[in-house]
Amino acid sequence: MKHTIALSCVAAGCVLMSAPVDAQVAAKSSAPTSNKEAELSSRLDQLSSELAAVKAQLAAQKPVANVAPASEAPATESATVLTSYGEMGARFYNKDTGRNSADLTRFVLGFQHRFDSQTKLVTELEVEHAVSSSSGKGEVAVEQAYIERQLNANWAARAGLFVMPMGLLNENHEPTAYYGVQRNFVETAIIPSTWREGGVQFVGDLDQGLTLQAGLSTGFDLNKWDPKDAETVGSPLGAVHQELSQAKSHDWGGFAALNWRGVPGLQLGGALFTGQGSQGQTGVSKMGVTLWDLHARYTPGAWDLSALFAQGRISHTADFNQTLVGNPYLVPSRFSGWYTQAAYKLWSRGDLALSPFVRWEQFNTREAFADIGAGLTPEAAKAERVITVGANLAVGSGVVFKADIQRFKKNSDDNRLNLGLGWSF
C-alpha cells in the first residue's frame, strides 16, 4: 500500500508539472483553443480525483493510538523492581521417625527502587516458618534495608541494614545459589548466616579482579546469652546477634572483606569482623568478638568446587562465665569449622540441569573455654563431622528442586533424608 501511495503522488506531481507546458503550447498553436482547453480541463479533473484518492489512503493509514510528545522519551526500565526468594523442605530421619517434619523455611519479598542513576534503595522482608504469632515459632524480620550511592566509577557507599560480606553464603544465600536442601553447617553455626548489621559500608573495585568491602557496623550483645538455651550450642554468635532490632550501640565493630576474581571462574577471598560485645553494661567485663574466614570457589566448565574455613573467638569470658556457673551452656572462647564441596553438572536438556554434589564438613561450636578453675571450666566438645550427598535440579534460572542424604559422625540420630524446593527472582 505504501508503494501504491508513493507512485500515485509521483504521478500527480508529473501531471501538475506538465499542465503549464500544455497551456503554453496551446497558446502558440494555430488550432482552435477551445479543444485544447477542454482537454486540459478534463486532465485537471482527473488529477483532482487522483489526489482525493491519495488523501483518503493516507488518512486510512494514519495511526490512531496515543503517542507521547516528542519531548517525552518512552519508558525503557522501571525504577522499582520486585524481588523474591523462598524455600521449603521436608526431613525424614532414619531412626526416630517421630521427628520427621515439613516446613516453609522462609519466604522473602524485596524491592529495589532507583531514585536516579547513582542512588538506589534495597529492601527485603522475610517470614520464617510460614506463620508468625505469639504461639508460633515463626518470625517476621527485615533482612535488608539500605541506601546505596555510587560515588564514582569504582566506589559505592551503603548505609542502613545490610548483609555482612562474610564467607561464600552470607551475601549469596538464595536457595538457587547453593547446593543442598539446607545451608551448610559451617556458614550457619560458625558464621551466623544470614547475618546482617546496621552501619556504613564502602564497596570498591580495585581493578585486577580485586574487590574490597569495608566499614563500621553494630555488633554482638553478649548480655543476650541464655546459659539455659541450647540455641547457644547451635550457633554462639547466632544467639547474640542484634539484627538492628533496638540494638545496643555502645560498642561498634569494624569489618573488611577482600576477594580476587582475576581468573575466569575463580574466587579467592577472606573476611574479618572485630568488635566489643559487652555493650558497656555495668558489671560486665569487656569481651571482644572476632570472626574471620578464608574461602575459595572455582567453576571450570561443568565443575563447581569450593572450600571454606571460619573461626570465631570471644575474649575475656572468664569473669562473665563465673556468674553463669551451674548452668549447662557457658560462653565458649573459640569455635571454628571448615568444609570442602564438589558439584558437577551431569545432565542438561533445554532449561533443565541436574548437578550432583558431595560436601564434607567439620565444625565445633564449643571448641575451647577460658579457665575458670578446676571443676568449673566446661570441657571442650568434640567436633561434629557431616557428609552430605545429593543433587540440585535447576529449572530455568529461578527454580530448583533438591534432595540429599546427610550422615553425622558424632550424633547419628540426626542422620536423615532431605527434600526441598526453592525459587529466586
Image: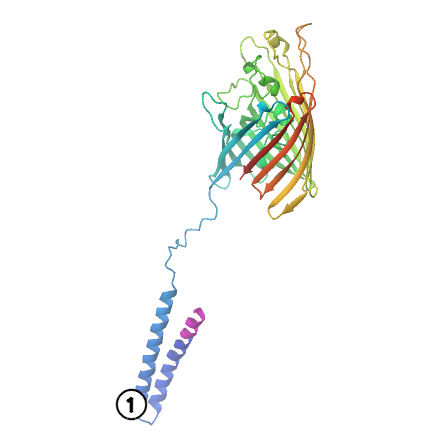
Q: According to the image, what is the colour scheme of the structure?
A: rainbow
Position above or below: 374 against 406: above
Q: Is residue 350 visible?
A: yes
Q: In x, y percent, where is residue 213?
A: 60, 31
Q: Is residue 122 visible?
A: no
- Label 1 amino acid? Ser
Q: In x, y percent, where is residue 307?
A: 69, 31
Q: Nearer the viewer, residue 359 or 166?
A: 359
Q: Quadrant of residue 340?
A: top right
Q: Quadrant of residue 279?
A: top right
Q: Quadrant of residue 271?
A: top right
Determine crowd level at label 1: few under 14, some 14-19, many 20+ residues with C-alpha closer than 10 A. few
The prevailing secondary structure element of the residues shown in magenta is: helix
Q: Residue at coordinates 33% horizontally, 73% vertically from top-left?
A: 52
Q: Residue 4: within the magenta?
A: yes
Q: In x, y percent, where is residue 263?
A: 70, 41
Quadrant that contains the N terminus = bottom left
Residue that lies at the very extreme toward the left in this rendered image: 34
Q: Residue at coordinates 70% horizontally, 18% vertically from top-left?
A: 382
Magenta-tinted stretch:
1-9
Q: Which residue is mark 1?
A: 34
Q: In x, y percent, where is residue 109?
A: 49, 34
Residue that lies at the very extreme toward the bottom in this rendered image: 30
